[in-house]
Image: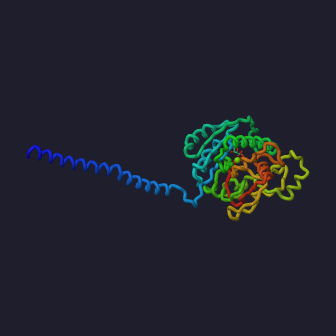
Amino acid sequence: MNKYQQFLSHRRWLCVALTLFFLTWIVAWECVPKYLSSHLTSVAASHSARLAPSVTQAEPDHVLILTPVKNAARYLPHYFELVDRLDYPKNKVSIGFLVSDTTDNTMSLLRRQQRRWKYHYHSFEVFEKDYHFQLPEGRRHDFHLQPLRRSYMARSRNMLLSLALRQEHEWVLWLDVDVVRYSTSILRDLMSVNVDIVVPNCLRVTDDGSFWGYDKNNWQETEESLVIQRDLDPDYVLLEGYNEFPTERYLMVDMPTHHDRLNKVTLDGVGATFTLVKANVHREGANFPSFVLKHEVETEGFAKMAKAMGFGVYGLPSYIIYHAKND
Ligand SMILES: Nc1nc2c(ncn2[C@@H]2O[C@H](COP(=O)(O)OP(=O)(O)O)[C@@H](O)[C@H]2O)c(=O)[nH]1
Ligand SMILES: [Mg+2]
Protein backbone atom coordinates (compact mmCIF):
# COMPACT_ATOMS: atom_id res chain seq x y z
CA MET A 1 0.00 0.00 0.00
CA ASN A 2 1.46 3.35 -1.03
CA LYS A 3 1.34 6.48 1.10
CA TYR A 4 -1.75 7.80 -0.69
CA GLN A 5 -3.71 4.56 -0.06
CA GLN A 6 -2.58 4.60 3.57
CA PHE A 7 -3.84 8.16 3.94
CA LEU A 8 -7.27 7.21 2.46
CA SER A 9 -7.58 4.24 4.76
CA HIS A 10 -6.78 6.35 7.85
CA ARG A 11 -9.25 8.99 6.73
CA ARG A 12 -12.01 6.35 6.40
CA TRP A 13 -11.40 5.18 9.97
CA LEU A 14 -11.28 8.76 11.15
CA CYS A 15 -14.71 9.40 9.54
CA VAL A 16 -16.15 6.28 11.11
CA ALA A 17 -14.78 7.33 14.54
CA LEU A 18 -16.11 10.88 14.20
CA THR A 19 -19.55 9.62 13.10
CA LEU A 20 -19.68 7.24 16.05
CA PHE A 21 -18.59 10.03 18.37
CA PHE A 22 -21.36 12.37 17.13
CA LEU A 23 -23.99 9.65 17.28
CA THR A 24 -22.99 8.88 20.88
CA TRP A 25 -23.05 12.57 21.73
CA ILE A 26 -26.58 12.99 20.30
CA VAL A 27 -27.83 9.93 22.14
CA ALA A 28 -26.16 11.06 25.39
CA TRP A 29 -27.39 14.65 25.33
CA GLU A 30 -30.80 14.28 23.75
CA CYS A 31 -32.36 10.90 24.32
CA VAL A 32 -30.97 9.83 27.72
CA PRO A 33 -32.04 12.95 29.65
CA LYS A 34 -35.49 12.82 28.04
CA TYR A 35 -35.85 9.19 28.98
CA LEU A 36 -34.50 9.77 32.47
CA SER A 37 -36.65 12.80 33.14
CA SER A 38 -39.84 11.14 31.98
CA HIS A 39 -38.96 7.97 33.89
CA LEU A 40 -38.11 9.86 37.11
CA THR A 41 -41.26 11.97 36.83
CA SER A 42 -43.42 8.90 36.64
CA VAL A 43 -41.57 7.29 39.57
CA ALA A 44 -41.97 10.48 41.62
CA ALA A 45 -45.62 10.76 40.66
CA SER A 46 -46.40 7.23 41.74
CA HIS A 47 -44.42 7.76 44.99
CA SER A 48 -46.19 11.01 45.88
CA ALA A 49 -49.53 9.43 45.03
CA ARG A 50 -48.81 6.92 47.76
CA LEU A 51 -47.70 9.55 50.32
CA ALA A 52 -50.32 12.23 49.74
CA PRO A 53 -53.65 11.87 51.51
CA SER A 54 -56.42 11.07 49.06
CA VAL A 55 -58.74 13.97 48.32
CA THR A 56 -61.45 12.39 50.42
CA GLN A 57 -59.14 11.93 53.45
CA ALA A 58 -59.02 15.19 55.44
CA GLU A 59 -55.72 16.26 56.97
CA PRO A 60 -55.94 15.69 60.78
CA ASP A 61 -56.33 18.85 62.86
CA HIS A 62 -53.46 20.12 64.96
CA VAL A 63 -53.98 19.59 68.70
CA LEU A 64 -52.15 21.18 71.61
CA ILE A 65 -52.08 19.01 74.75
CA LEU A 66 -51.73 21.10 77.91
CA THR A 67 -50.93 19.72 81.35
CA PRO A 68 -50.25 21.73 84.50
CA VAL A 69 -48.15 19.73 86.96
CA LYS A 70 -47.05 19.84 90.54
CA ASN A 71 -45.07 17.02 92.17
CA ALA A 72 -46.19 14.70 89.36
CA ALA A 73 -43.12 12.48 88.93
CA ARG A 74 -44.92 9.25 89.80
CA TYR A 75 -47.52 9.80 87.06
CA LEU A 76 -45.31 11.02 84.21
CA PRO A 77 -44.01 7.68 82.78
CA HIS A 78 -47.54 6.33 82.34
CA TYR A 79 -48.79 9.69 81.09
CA PHE A 80 -46.25 9.54 78.23
CA GLU A 81 -47.05 5.90 77.46
CA LEU A 82 -50.72 6.81 76.99
CA VAL A 83 -50.02 9.89 74.86
CA ASP A 84 -47.57 7.83 72.75
CA ARG A 85 -50.28 5.21 72.13
CA LEU A 86 -52.81 7.74 70.83
CA ASP A 87 -54.03 6.87 67.36
CA TYR A 88 -53.10 10.29 66.03
CA PRO A 89 -50.17 11.55 63.90
CA LYS A 90 -47.49 12.88 66.23
CA ASN A 91 -46.55 15.69 63.86
CA LYS A 92 -50.04 17.08 64.50
CA VAL A 93 -49.59 17.04 68.26
CA SER A 94 -47.92 19.76 70.37
CA ILE A 95 -47.31 19.27 74.08
CA GLY A 96 -47.03 21.94 76.78
CA PHE A 97 -46.41 21.63 80.54
CA LEU A 98 -46.43 24.19 83.30
CA VAL A 99 -44.50 23.07 86.38
CA SER A 100 -45.28 24.93 89.62
CA ASP A 101 -44.16 24.78 93.24
CA THR A 102 -42.63 21.36 92.76
CA THR A 103 -40.31 19.63 95.21
CA ASP A 104 -39.92 16.19 93.56
CA ASN A 105 -38.01 15.32 90.33
CA THR A 106 -40.88 16.29 87.99
CA MET A 107 -38.69 18.81 86.18
CA SER A 108 -35.77 16.49 85.44
CA LEU A 109 -38.17 13.75 84.29
CA LEU A 110 -39.89 16.20 81.95
CA ARG A 111 -36.53 17.35 80.53
CA ARG A 112 -35.63 13.70 79.86
CA GLN A 113 -38.96 13.06 78.13
CA GLN A 114 -38.51 16.29 76.18
CA ARG A 115 -35.13 15.08 74.82
CA ARG A 116 -36.70 11.77 73.91
CA TRP A 117 -39.85 13.05 72.19
CA LYS A 118 -39.15 16.56 70.87
CA TYR A 119 -38.44 15.39 67.30
CA HIS A 120 -41.47 13.11 67.24
CA TYR A 121 -44.12 15.64 68.24
CA HIS A 122 -44.63 18.96 66.47
CA SER A 123 -43.34 20.67 69.61
CA PHE A 124 -42.70 19.86 73.25
CA GLU A 125 -42.42 22.79 75.65
CA VAL A 126 -41.92 22.89 79.41
CA PHE A 127 -42.56 26.13 81.29
CA GLU A 128 -41.94 26.88 84.94
CA LYS A 129 -43.77 29.32 87.19
CA ASP A 130 -43.87 29.09 90.96
CA TYR A 131 -46.74 30.67 92.88
CA HIS A 132 -45.28 29.69 96.28
CA PHE A 133 -48.62 28.16 97.13
CA GLN A 134 -48.43 25.09 99.34
CA LEU A 135 -51.42 23.27 100.77
CA PRO A 136 -51.17 21.75 104.23
CA GLU A 137 -50.06 18.10 103.90
CA GLY A 138 -52.99 15.71 103.21
CA ARG A 139 -55.59 18.51 103.05
CA ARG A 140 -55.66 18.98 99.25
CA HIS A 141 -59.39 18.33 99.08
CA ASP A 142 -60.50 20.18 102.26
CA PHE A 143 -63.76 22.03 101.55
CA HIS A 144 -62.60 25.42 102.84
CA LEU A 145 -59.32 25.32 100.93
CA GLN A 146 -60.88 24.65 97.53
CA PRO A 147 -61.63 28.21 96.33
CA LEU A 148 -58.01 29.24 96.96
CA ARG A 149 -56.56 26.01 95.52
CA ARG A 150 -58.75 26.27 92.42
CA SER A 151 -57.89 29.93 92.02
CA TYR A 152 -54.16 29.04 91.78
CA MET A 153 -55.02 26.23 89.37
CA ALA A 154 -56.88 28.77 87.21
CA ARG A 155 -53.88 31.09 87.14
CA SER A 156 -51.62 28.17 86.21
CA ARG A 157 -53.88 27.08 83.37
CA ASN A 158 -54.17 30.61 81.98
CA MET A 159 -50.41 31.06 82.17
CA LEU A 160 -49.81 27.76 80.36
CA LEU A 161 -52.41 28.56 77.71
CA SER A 162 -50.99 31.97 76.92
CA LEU A 163 -47.42 30.62 76.74
CA ALA A 164 -48.19 27.60 74.56
CA LEU A 165 -51.03 28.48 72.18
CA ARG A 166 -49.79 29.07 68.61
CA GLN A 167 -51.45 29.93 65.33
CA GLU A 168 -51.33 26.33 64.02
CA HIS A 169 -53.33 24.86 66.92
CA GLU A 170 -56.93 24.00 66.10
CA TRP A 171 -57.80 22.18 69.31
CA VAL A 172 -56.59 22.39 72.90
CA LEU A 173 -56.74 19.27 75.04
CA TRP A 174 -56.56 19.83 78.79
CA LEU A 175 -55.18 16.59 80.17
CA ASP A 176 -54.42 16.06 83.86
CA VAL A 177 -51.27 14.09 84.54
CA ASP A 178 -53.05 11.51 86.71
CA VAL A 179 -55.54 10.27 84.10
CA VAL A 180 -54.43 6.65 83.77
CA ARG A 181 -56.67 4.95 81.19
CA TYR A 182 -58.35 6.09 78.00
CA SER A 183 -59.01 4.77 74.51
CA THR A 184 -56.28 5.22 71.89
CA SER A 185 -58.94 6.66 69.55
CA ILE A 186 -60.15 9.28 72.03
CA LEU A 187 -58.81 12.32 70.20
CA ARG A 188 -60.45 11.37 66.92
CA ASP A 189 -63.64 10.34 68.76
CA LEU A 190 -64.01 13.60 70.67
CA MET A 191 -63.15 15.68 67.60
CA SER A 192 -65.81 13.84 65.62
CA VAL A 193 -68.45 15.22 68.03
CA ASN A 194 -67.41 18.60 66.58
CA VAL A 195 -68.52 20.93 69.37
CA ASP A 196 -66.77 23.84 71.11
CA ILE A 197 -66.04 22.02 74.38
CA VAL A 198 -66.45 18.30 75.05
CA VAL A 199 -65.55 16.04 77.98
CA PRO A 200 -65.70 12.26 78.46
CA ASN A 201 -66.90 10.76 81.74
CA CYS A 202 -64.02 10.38 84.19
CA LEU A 203 -64.28 7.57 86.74
CA ARG A 204 -61.81 6.52 89.38
CA VAL A 205 -59.83 3.29 89.01
CA THR A 206 -60.95 0.75 91.62
CA ASP A 207 -59.44 -2.60 92.67
CA ASP A 208 -62.64 -4.55 92.06
CA GLY A 209 -63.75 -2.75 88.88
CA SER A 210 -66.73 -1.18 90.66
CA PHE A 211 -68.18 2.08 89.33
CA TRP A 212 -66.83 5.11 91.15
CA GLY A 213 -67.27 8.57 89.67
CA TYR A 214 -64.22 10.83 89.86
CA ASP A 215 -64.68 14.10 87.96
CA LYS A 216 -67.74 15.63 89.60
CA ASN A 217 -67.09 18.98 87.96
CA ASN A 218 -68.95 17.87 84.82
CA TRP A 219 -72.60 18.75 85.56
CA GLN A 220 -75.87 20.27 84.52
CA GLU A 221 -77.71 22.92 86.49
CA THR A 222 -81.18 21.79 87.69
CA GLU A 223 -84.26 23.72 88.77
CA GLU A 224 -83.26 23.10 92.39
CA SER A 225 -79.65 24.20 91.92
CA LEU A 226 -80.78 27.43 90.27
CA VAL A 227 -83.20 28.14 93.13
CA ILE A 228 -80.35 27.70 95.65
CA GLN A 229 -78.22 30.19 93.71
CA ARG A 230 -80.96 32.85 93.58
CA ASP A 231 -80.30 34.14 97.11
CA LEU A 232 -76.68 33.13 97.40
CA ASP A 233 -73.90 35.66 98.11
CA PRO A 234 -72.39 36.32 94.63
CA ASP A 235 -68.91 35.60 96.01
CA TYR A 236 -69.85 32.17 97.35
CA VAL A 237 -68.07 29.37 95.47
CA LEU A 238 -70.14 26.22 94.90
CA LEU A 239 -68.31 22.90 95.00
CA GLU A 240 -69.46 19.43 93.99
CA GLY A 241 -69.05 16.32 96.09
CA TYR A 242 -69.00 17.98 99.52
CA ASN A 243 -71.62 17.37 102.21
CA GLU A 244 -70.96 20.85 103.61
CA PHE A 245 -73.10 22.42 100.90
CA PRO A 246 -75.19 20.21 98.54
CA THR A 247 -75.57 22.00 95.20
CA GLU A 248 -78.41 19.84 93.73
CA ARG A 249 -76.75 19.72 90.34
CA TYR A 250 -77.02 16.70 88.04
CA LEU A 251 -73.50 15.27 87.82
CA MET A 252 -72.37 13.49 84.67
CA VAL A 253 -70.94 10.65 86.80
CA ASP A 254 -74.56 10.00 87.91
CA MET A 255 -75.98 9.88 84.37
CA PRO A 256 -76.73 6.60 82.52
CA THR A 257 -73.61 5.22 80.83
CA HIS A 258 -75.12 2.50 78.59
CA HIS A 259 -75.81 4.66 75.53
CA ASP A 260 -73.65 5.06 72.44
CA ARG A 261 -70.22 6.39 73.45
CA LEU A 262 -70.62 9.51 71.33
CA ASN A 263 -74.10 10.30 72.66
CA LYS A 264 -73.78 13.86 73.99
CA VAL A 265 -75.57 15.87 76.66
CA THR A 266 -75.31 19.60 77.32
CA LEU A 267 -73.33 20.60 80.42
CA ASP A 268 -73.08 23.82 82.45
CA GLY A 269 -69.89 22.99 84.34
CA VAL A 270 -66.80 21.00 83.29
CA GLY A 271 -63.67 19.70 84.93
CA ALA A 272 -60.37 19.42 83.09
CA THR A 273 -59.22 15.85 83.57
CA PHE A 274 -59.67 15.41 79.78
CA THR A 275 -61.31 18.42 78.16
CA LEU A 276 -61.17 19.08 74.43
CA VAL A 277 -61.68 22.69 73.39
CA LYS A 278 -61.75 24.31 69.96
CA ALA A 279 -58.72 26.61 70.11
CA ASN A 280 -60.77 29.58 68.89
CA VAL A 281 -62.89 29.37 72.05
CA HIS A 282 -59.75 30.27 74.01
CA ARG A 283 -58.56 32.76 71.38
CA GLU A 284 -61.83 34.64 71.66
CA GLY A 285 -61.20 35.08 75.38
CA ALA A 286 -62.77 32.19 77.25
CA ASN A 287 -60.31 31.08 79.94
CA PHE A 288 -60.22 29.97 83.58
CA PRO A 289 -61.46 32.61 86.05
CA SER A 290 -59.30 32.84 89.16
CA PHE A 291 -62.06 34.97 90.73
CA VAL A 292 -65.64 33.97 91.49
CA LEU A 293 -67.73 33.95 88.33
CA LYS A 294 -71.36 32.82 88.70
CA HIS A 295 -70.35 30.94 91.88
CA GLU A 296 -67.49 29.12 90.13
CA VAL A 297 -63.75 29.36 89.73
CA GLU A 298 -61.34 27.62 87.33
CA THR A 299 -62.76 24.91 85.04
CA GLU A 300 -66.44 25.21 85.97
CA GLY A 301 -66.01 28.98 85.67
CA PHE A 302 -64.55 28.38 82.20
CA ALA A 303 -67.70 26.49 81.20
CA LYS A 304 -69.89 29.28 82.59
CA MET A 305 -67.87 31.90 80.72
CA ALA A 306 -67.89 29.95 77.45
CA LYS A 307 -71.66 29.40 77.66
CA ALA A 308 -72.23 33.10 78.37
CA MET A 309 -70.22 33.81 75.19
CA GLY A 310 -72.52 31.49 73.21
CA PHE A 311 -70.26 28.42 72.92
CA GLY A 312 -71.57 24.86 73.21
CA VAL A 313 -70.45 22.75 76.19
CA TYR A 314 -71.09 19.00 76.05
CA GLY A 315 -70.33 15.79 77.89
CA LEU A 316 -70.31 12.15 76.79
CA PRO A 317 -71.67 10.15 79.79
CA SER A 318 -71.01 6.77 78.11
CA TYR A 319 -67.44 7.58 77.03
CA ILE A 320 -65.45 6.42 80.05
CA ILE A 321 -61.89 7.31 81.04
CA TYR A 322 -60.14 6.63 84.35
CA HIS A 323 -58.33 8.77 86.91
CA ALA A 324 -55.69 7.36 89.25
CA LYS A 325 -56.75 5.97 92.58
CA ASN A 326 -55.28 8.75 94.71
CA ASP A 327 -56.42 10.38 97.97
N1 LIG B 1 -49.06 24.08 87.81
C1 LIG B 1 -49.75 23.49 88.79
N2 LIG B 1 -50.31 22.30 88.57
C2 LIG B 1 -51.00 21.71 89.57
C3 LIG B 1 -51.18 22.32 90.85
N3 LIG B 1 -51.92 21.47 91.62
C4 LIG B 1 -52.19 20.40 90.85
N4 LIG B 1 -51.64 20.54 89.60
C5 LIG B 1 -51.73 19.65 88.44
O1 LIG B 1 -53.02 19.90 87.91
C6 LIG B 1 -53.64 18.70 87.50
C7 LIG B 1 -54.91 18.48 88.35
O2 LIG B 1 -54.54 18.46 89.71
P1 LIG B 1 -55.07 17.34 90.70
O3 LIG B 1 -54.43 17.62 92.02
O4 LIG B 1 -54.85 15.99 90.11
O5 LIG B 1 -56.60 17.69 90.75
P2 LIG B 1 -57.83 16.75 91.10
O6 LIG B 1 -57.58 15.37 90.55
O7 LIG B 1 -58.97 17.45 90.45
O8 LIG B 1 -57.91 16.75 92.59
C8 LIG B 1 -52.59 17.62 87.67
O9 LIG B 1 -51.92 17.45 86.45
C9 LIG B 1 -51.68 18.18 88.75
O10 LIG B 1 -50.35 17.68 88.66
C10 LIG B 1 -50.58 23.60 91.06
O11 LIG B 1 -50.67 24.20 92.12
N5 LIG B 1 -49.90 24.14 89.99
MG1 LIG C 1 -56.15 14.51 89.54
Q: Number of numbered discs present?
A: 0
Q: Residue at x 18, y 46 (%)?
A: 11
Apparent side of residue 36 relative to residue 191 in the rendered image (left or right): left
The residue lying at 60 percent from left, 47 percent from top is 80
Where is residue 38 shown, x and y percent of the image?
41, 55
Residue pushed farthest left? 1
> Which of the 4 image quadrants contains residue 156?
top right
Picture quarter with ligand 1: top right
Question: Coloring scheme of the render?
Answer: rainbow
Q: Residue 105 appears in which quarter of the rendering?
A: top right
Q: Residue furthest right?
A: 231
> Where's residue 154, x and y in %?
75, 43
Residue found farthest to the bottom: 259
Image coordinates for residue 169, horizontal then vertical, percent: 65, 48
Query: Could you tell me residue 205's position as x and y percent?
Result: 67, 53
Residue in front for this viewpoint, 277 or 53 = 53
**Which residue lies most toward the front here?**
4
- The residue under the point 74% across, 37% down is 134
Which residue appears at 55% of the width and 57% of the height? 53
Nearer to me, 158 or 17? 17
Q: Nearer the viewer, residue 164 or 295?
A: 164
Q: Is residue 23 above or below residue 128?
A: below
Quick check: 239 left or right of 320?
right
